[in-house]
């Protein structure tokens, strides 16, 4: 089977497994795991922030990041198909008491005029105040679209003027960086807090990080423990992340090339594919998924009329070409 359901399905390479086996470890709840500390310091530095916190999942990293900006009873604004709104099982409301309002942008863009119109300052005990704006880069359900850095910077300037926070869901920020050449520090400058993932394009088996100021991360460390995310000798997992940063970052360009190859085969304009995700409109998405499985290719339905194809570390050029030919015969 060629698995294009997600870039979360990758398996650790042999070199990554050796790095994990050799990791120096300690009890991270006591702050004594040197490999975790090295990973947190490295990732914080990559984005130009003071600190970072290793978490088991991207959803937890997002919950911790958003709650560092948004108090219970306040709101975060985001795009209607944002991961925090659609794919985290209501965790922000259930755990943090946060409400959301959304704008709709099919291409995953950031319409600043619409955000300005939605923004609600503190107007006393009548309306929910806006405490943060959340943006996703790349935007998963918009087909891995990359937000123009100019739009992010414009949002940052406006948010600073009105005194609201900016959260960047950067689960695939590495893909945005490789696709555009925009430095990671530049992406870090536009956000008060970020969440970045190691277990998607970078190919680590598990793990994400919340990135932000030292006080925000210190508070998040307490909340991570409250939520059951206090891990012990977790350096064996952090070592996978360090190895991925060393060896799997620049190769993301290959995934992007393979995604454009797939897009062309299934009738999607390759110019609309910014990174490693292809969104294929189809009248019968579940039926297409079933036929593809029978033909030896796993793809995912992310809606009744939407199929998603995701390239990754475990799909080389030969597999991508084979999948392209198979899917083209089914389209």
Image: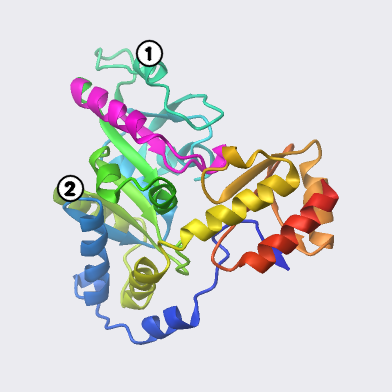
Q: Determine which quarter of the picture holds residue 1.
A: bottom right
Q: Position of residue 60 (x, y in %)?
A: 39, 53
Q: Position of residue 81 (x, y in %)?
A: 53, 34
Query: Which residue position is annotated with label 1?
Result: 117
The reply to whether dot 2 and dot 1 touch (C-beta < 8 Å) is no
Residue 73 in sight here: no
Q: Is residue 22 magenta?
A: no
Region in magenta? 132-161
Q: Position of residue 278 (x, y in %)?
A: 62, 46
Query: Which is nearer the eye, 179 or 43?
Result: 179
In the image, residue 12 above or below residue 192: below
The residue tagged with tag 2: helix, strand or loop?
loop
Query: Which residue position is annotated with label 2?
Result: 213
With 128 as the anchor, is 138 left or right in this view?
A: right
Q: Determine which quarter of the picture holds residue 322.
A: bottom right
With 184 as the anchor, is 208 left or right in this view?
A: right
What's the CA distance linking mark 2 and mark 1? 29 Å
Q: Is residue 147 magenta?
A: yes
Q: Quadrant of the C terminus?
A: top right
Task: Give the residue displayed 19% in from the left and 55% down from the top.
Answer: 51
Looking at the image, tell me whether mark 2 or mark 1 is earlier in sequence order.
1
Task: Give the residue displayed 77% in from the left and 38% down from the top.
Answer: 282
Residue 37 in sight here: yes
In the image, residue 155 above or below residue 252: above
The residue tagged with tag 1: helix, strand or loop?
helix
Task: Give the residue displayed 43% in from the left and 67% down from the top.
Answer: 248
């Amino acid at each position: 089977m060629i698995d294009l359901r997600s870039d979360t399905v990758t398996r650790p390479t042999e070199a990554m497994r050796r790095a994990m086996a050799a990791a120096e470890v300690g009890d991270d709840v006591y702050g004594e795991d040197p490999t975790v500390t090295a990973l947190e310091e490295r990732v914080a530095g990559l984005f130009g922030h003071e600190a970072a916190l290793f978490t088991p999942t991207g959803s937890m990293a997002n919950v911790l990041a958003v709650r560092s900006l948004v108090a219970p009873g306040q709101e975060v604004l985001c795009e209607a198909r944002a991961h925090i709104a659609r794919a985290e099982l209501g965790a922000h409301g259930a755990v943090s008491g946060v409400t959301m309002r959304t704008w709709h942008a099919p291409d995953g863009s950031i319409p600043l005029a619409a955000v300005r119109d939605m923004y609600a300052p503190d107007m006393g005990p009548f309306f929910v105040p806006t405490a943060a704006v959340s943006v996703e880069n790349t935007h998963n359900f918009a087909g891995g679209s990359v937000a123009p850095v100019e739009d992010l910077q414009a949002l940052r300037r406006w948010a600073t003027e009105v005194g609201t926070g900016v959260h960047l869901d950067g689960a695939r920020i590495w893909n945005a960086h490789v696709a555009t050449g925009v430095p990671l520090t530049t992406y870090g400058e536009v956000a008060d807090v970020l969440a970045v993932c190691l277990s998607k394009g970078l190919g680590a088996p598990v793990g994400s990080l919340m990135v932000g100021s030292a006080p925000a991360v210190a508070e998040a460390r307490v909340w991570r423990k409250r939520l059951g995310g206090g891990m012990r000798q977790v350096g064996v997992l952090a070592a996978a992340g360090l190895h991925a940063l060393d060896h799997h970052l620049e190769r993301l360009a290959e995934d992007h090339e393979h995604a454009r190859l797939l897009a062309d085969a299934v009738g999607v304009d390759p110019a609309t594919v910014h990174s490693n995700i292809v969104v294929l409109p189809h009248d019968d998405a579940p039926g297409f998924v079933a036929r593809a499985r029978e033909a030896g290719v796993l793809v995912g339905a992310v809606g009744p009329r939407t199929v998603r194809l995701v390239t990754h570390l475990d799909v080389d050029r030969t597999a991508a070409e084979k999948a392209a030919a198979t899917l083209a015969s089914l389209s």
